[in-house]
Amino acid sequence: MTEIRTPRLLLRSWHDDDLAPMADINADPRVMRWVDDGSVHDLDRTAEDIERWEEEWDEEGFGLFAVELLASGELIGFTGLSVPEFLPEVMPAVAICWRLGAQFWGQGYGSEAAHATLEFALQDRGLERVISINRVGDDASENVIRKLGMAPERETAHPVYGYPLRVHTIDLTEFQA
Ligand SMILES: CC(C)(COP(=O)(O)OP(=O)(O)OC[C@H]1O[C@@H](n2cnc3c(N)ncnc32)[C@H](O)[C@@H]1OP(=O)(O)O)[C@@H](O)C(=O)NCCC(=O)NCCS
């Protein structure tokens, strides 16, 4: 699996000792507020999550990167790519996603990791386009989406939870490396 270095971050494969810090992130209701039904994930669920993310790398050749802070070696969360099967109307598609621990917000890490992920997707992996799907009201994600230069594509509703979603898109010609 690819490793990517940015000025402050290392995007890398998952290690066994990522489980505890990722479970702490997943246990924080502030972090999970805009994810699925907003419920937190415990340690067992986080272990299942990481296993599924690793399988996606094997199956698709892309997936979610563990994001490490170069200065300290801490795991700060993930960014990466996943196939948004929960939203059939946008398929086929690959979506960019992110989740950082709350203590790491507000320092530009989300955008730094997301930009590197888009570069990987569009340039290295050669994907035709990447979409993002965010809940209306998730302003922090929308701020990242705007800074990435992604264009609004549609508004829709979550097929299970019913809340409003925004879909944005970008391709290689629109991407500012
Ligand atoms: C969405 C999320 C990844 C955003 O992370 P983030 O690192 O705070 O986002 P940004 O990269 O936009 O940085 C935020 C602010 O840091 C500030 N900042 C401080 N130092 C900075 C630097 N060196 N470079 C850039 N920005 C910096 C900026 O003010 C920036 O905001 P601005 O662009 O409005 O000026 C984070 O809020 C998160 O993980 N949320 C929970 C999970 C979630 O909701 N996921 C999506 C649903 S599935």
Image (cartoon, rainbow, N blue to C red):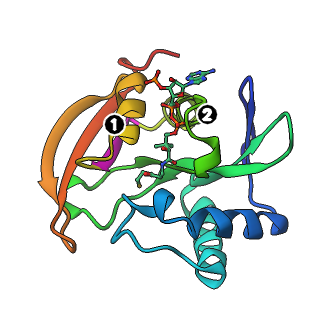
Disc 2: CA contacts within 10 A as few (<14), some (14-19) or many (>=20)? some
Residue 66 visible = no
Helix, strand or loop under label 1: helix
Magenta stretch bounds: 128-134
Left or right, 17 with reference to 27 = right
Q: Nearer the viewer, residue 42 or 127?
A: 42
On residue 109, the disc is 2
- Quarter where residue 52 is shown: bottom right
User: Horizontal and vertical percent for residue 88?
Assistant: 22, 63
- Distance, label 2 to label 1, CA atoms, is 15 Å
- Neighbor class of circle 1 (other Cα within 10 Å; few <14, some 14-19, many 20+) is some
- Magenta segment includes 132: yes
Q: Position of residue 104 (x, y in %)?
A: 64, 42
Where is 43 relative to 55, above or below?
below
Residue where numbered disc 1 is placed: 142
116, 67: nearer the viewer: 67
Question: Is residue 160 rendered magenta in the image?
Answer: no
Task: Name the residue located 61 percent from the left edge and 59 percent from the top edge.
Answer: 57
| Nearer to us in this view, 130 or 74 | 74
Residue 27 position within the rendered picture, expressed as x and y whole percent measured from the top left: 58, 70
Residue 124 sits above or below residue 159 on the image = above
